[in-house]
Image (cartoon, rainbow, N blue to C red):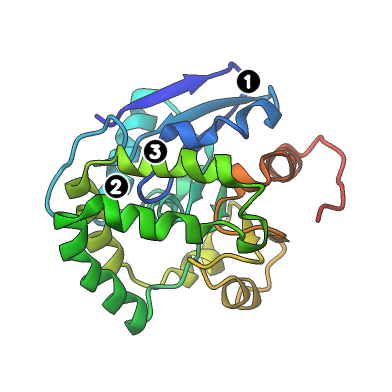
Amino acid sequence: MLNFEKKGNGKENLVLLHGFMENLSIWDDMEPHLSKDFTLIKIDLPGHGKSDILGEVHTMELMADEVKKVVDHEKLDKFHLLGHSMGGYTSLAFAEKFPENLKSLTLFFSTYFADDEEKKEQRIKSYRIIKDAFPHYVRAGIPNLFNQNERDVLEGKIEIALDIALSTNNLGALASVKGMVERTDKKHILENLEAKIVVIAGKHDNAVKTDKTINNLPDRTNIKSYILDCGHNGHWEKPGICAEIINTELLHHLPKKFLL
């Protein structure tokens, strides 16, 4: 089973899925700002953190099945699911397979669109460098995921992200990239899921097409979206604001606030 950590004893269960070349420690900055009404279940996805590599290709569906084993182990029937980037893709696969388990689905700097052909080609070209020169791949890519206008302020956070990425098993990263290439469009999930849907995006996100993601959201009363003044990593760049949105949207008794 996947490695996971459980924190708190709130009545609402919030399952947190990290992104590519991350692990469950990415939530450390946001955690103190999250409501005590949550019990947090933080999971290391396959080939990341302390979780094993499960094959040459980690599809989003495979990862969703492994997440299901964790929530079943914890006897969670209905819970909130939040995924960052690749964790969001996994969350969408989970919502497709197990919609009855979800109270809410939060796409956290992620998208429901499949890769376009250019993005797929970029990923395929990265296979060899991930396998043979992983540290170079990490150091070239990670800093670009942060708001370029605040690189000096975010230097410490970028170093944390680099350390986590460099600690990732390169073959686990490779299996995940191959799985992301195979992703299909999941807009139909957002059109049909009965659970609440929250989309939190970054104005300066170089990994996700924020405008396309937000502008094409289905017009449904159960979908709420936010665009923040940050890059791809709101958990490090704007942890307090991100947590406040999550608290407000997922816990209905809290007062509504206008957030920017």
**Nearer the camera: disc 3 or disc 2:** 3
> At x 66% / y 66%, what residue is drawn?
203
Is residue 4 or residue 184 the one in the foreground? 4
Taking the image as shown, residue 190 lies to the left or right of residue 5, namely right
Query: Label 3's element?
Result: helix
Taking the image as shown, residue 260 lies to the left or right of residue 201, namely right
User: Where in the figure is residue 162, as x and y percent of width and height?
Assistant: 41, 44
Looking at the rendering, which quadrant does residue 44 occupy?
top left
Q: Amino acid at mark 1?
A: Gly
How far, Cα to Cα, is label 2 from label 1?
26 Å
* Residue located beneath label 3 in the image: 163
In the picture, the disc for residue 63 is 2
Vertical placement of residue 23 versus 256, above or below? above
Is residue 103 or residue 174 the one in the foreground? 174
How far, Cα to Cα, is label 3 from label 1?
31 Å
Q: Amino acid at mark 2?
A: Met
Q: Does the rendering let one see residue 112?
A: yes
Q: Are marks 3 and 2 in contact (CB under 8 Å)?
A: no
Q: Amino acid at mark 3?
A: Asp
